[in-house]
Image (spheres, coloured by chain):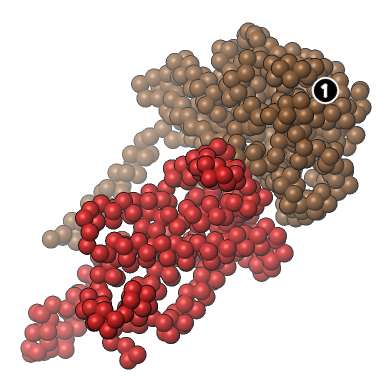
Amino acid sequence: MTQSPTLSRRSTSSAPALRKSRQRGADARAGYTFLLPWLLGFIALTVGPMISSLYLSFTNYNLFDPPKWIGLDNYTTLFQDERFLQSVGVTVGYVVFGTPLKLAAALAVAMLLNSKRRGQGFYRSAFYAPSLIGASVSIAIVWKAMFGDNGPVDQGLSIFGINLGGWVGNPSMTMPMFILLTVWQFGAPMVIFLAGLKQIPNDLYEAASMDGAGPVRKFFNITWPMLSPVIFFNLLMETIHAFQIFASAYIISNGEGGPAGSTLFYTLYLYLRGFSDFRMGYASAMAWLLVIVVGIITLIFFRTSKSWVHYSGDAK
Amino acid sequence: MINRRHFLTTVAVGTASAAALAACGTGPSSSGETGSAEKPVTINYTWWGNDDRAERTRKAIALFESKNPDIKVNGNFTDFAGYWQKRATEAAGGGLPDVMQWDLSYLRDYGQRNQLLDLGTVKINTDAFDKSLLPSGQIKGKTYGIPTSTNAFAVYYDPAKLASLGVAEPDGSWTYKEFNDFLTEVGTKSNSALFGSTDYTGVWWMFNIWLRQNGIEAFTEDGKLGFTKDDMKKWWNTTAGLRGTPAIVSEERVTQLAPKSPFGSNVTATEVTWDNFMAGYLADSGAKELKLVPVPSDDKDNLGLFLKPSMLMVASAKTKYKDAAARFIDFMVNDPEVGQIFKTSRGVPASKTQRDGTTFEGTDKLVVDYEKSIEKYLKDAPQPPIVGFGTLEASFKRVSSDLNYGKLTIDGAADAWFKEAEDLIKQNA
């Protein structure tokens, strides 16, 4: 990549082989030098902890005493742990319902913002803003207040004669609340969708209009296939992201996963196991299980993508 | 260009001088590093609590700093739940704050695992302490915590609310049935505008007291459970008829009001909890006066009550400033002016000098008088409970809450808790 024109010129000069390899060596050294800070960080802060967590997942480790090797015990006890199964259920429900809704909202708004109207710049920023601040602690606190007893949502709904009471304390309303929260933060995928939409040549739509295609037909026959690589990317990223929900769950449930375990997300339970119950080995096993599951899901996405994702230049 | 030789020399000289500088510094002695008025040392102090306690603590710290110009105290606080997760993270990283407010529930977890300083090795004056109280800060002969104050369990009520409902004030000599009838009366007479109480069977320490009323200790000497599943079911059955009635506020409301308590939010007329919550409740609810009476008991002569160290002061085993930490702890537990700042908000001061130096008026006097009034019923304070007790207490609260949500039956709740408890005891064996 960094091979400059000089290099290609030199390679045609006399004693080419030796010079070339020397130059390459120097390039590589320079490259690695520049890479070094990142590489050190990657090894010390990512690979190292991952390996030690893999080791810890086979031990009984309470943070204070040296870890005791117990083999696969952590992994096997996981599946007899009702709270673990509950956390899996909660998380899967959130991913399955939250992610598609969020992407649908992102795509819908992106399409609205794609047309040329006055004040588009303002709308784009306005819709993007929630996802900028969305992951922050303050939003979770505001959200909690909004959906609390006599909060704005409760009062707003009661105008229409719907009396649900506060959502925060009601186990059957917390999941809809979390899904709303994630849908509301559609800004990041929206921006990517918007970029993708800009890439679709307008003449395709014009040609389709000439042939008498309506908006629905245009969407399914032009927008969807042309946008499919972007949809695929967003789907993958948002799915992985959704599995990792933590901060908002921690804050809204006071770090307990309540009420009645309805917000006991996977990572929250992992955290509680590690730092409240001092079961770091157990938490490590959970972390690795999550890595494996997300890996498998990613693999499935890539495998099935062949049938619906179209790249330009594809034979299809 | 960097000359290789020159570069290496620079590095070598730099390293050597850094090492030399380090050697010149005052190396850690047995009493730790000390400061002076010109160059004070800074110790970190952390506590849990609400704004009320934060304000009082800041006053105490300012007083300490003015009397000890060679020490600066860097204060920090969170709520109770987040507090312990933070400490665990810090302990794992070897960076616990120098001095910490501590709870009996977690003393064994950290003390037994060498995370806390043996306070017997530093200078802290405990002459003015009741000798029966000090052992609750000790494990295997080593002192890890000094109690700041004592608290006891009580039933709070708001006399003004009872008067407005036309309900007679209780005198505290009641059986569980009488207590339950009282809660129902409050809820019914107020047309559910005011609930009787939060479900008191969801409070671990109340369960513990009930066990003691029945002659059972919660944990055995060798760290096993001293009660059976049936005991637990019987306990939860005490309020089985009240759940979902105006006698007990719904778990939904409790969750929604958190972190404030329903009592502090004026949603219930009574609350069963520690007597040192008085200041916090007054601040939260805005009530003029709150009163305290003993907990119910079916045995008039055995109320199962005890004085517990409401909080302890501990130091990190790894603190660099042992001497400064000890002086701060000594000040916080003994200084009469500190007693004057906290009154009974940490509990009734444990040291006699602090107790004598404090004037208790109004509601503070109520707390002190309450502890005096139950003196004849008091039993020995429980020893620091088993390792992992904090987890068990939290899980008791959670399982009870699931019970109130109707997600678990009483049998299911007992099964769930026992499974966790047995697993935990096995883990730490």
Quarter in which the N terminus of chain B is drawn: bottom left
Q: Is residue A283 visible from the viewing direction of this image?
A: no
Compared to A152, does A117 lie above or below? below
Residue in the image at 55% along x and 24% along y: B53
The answer to which of A82 and B332 lies nearer the viewer is A82
Any idea which chain is the brown one in this picture?
B
Residue A254 drawn at (x, y percent): 57, 43
Check disc 1 and report its element: helix, strand or loop: loop
Q: Which residue is mark 1?
A: B378
Residue in the image at 21% along x and 55% along y: A118
Q: Amino acid at mark 1?
A: Leu
Q: Is residue A27 left or right of residue B305?
A: left
The chain that hosts pointer 1 is B
Residue B356 drawn at (x, y percent): 66, 9
Residue sticking out furthest to the front: A212
Residue in the image at 86% along x and 48% along y: B229
The answer to which of A15 and A194 lies nearer the viewer is A194
Residue A164 drawn at (x, y percent): 60, 46
Crowd band around label 1 with a 10 angstrom C-alpha radius: few (<14), some (14–19), many (20+):
some
Compared to B1, does B335 lie above or below? above
- The colour applied to the residues of chain A in this rendering is red
Compared to B320, does A186 lie above or below? below
- Where is residue A20, by image quadrant? bottom left
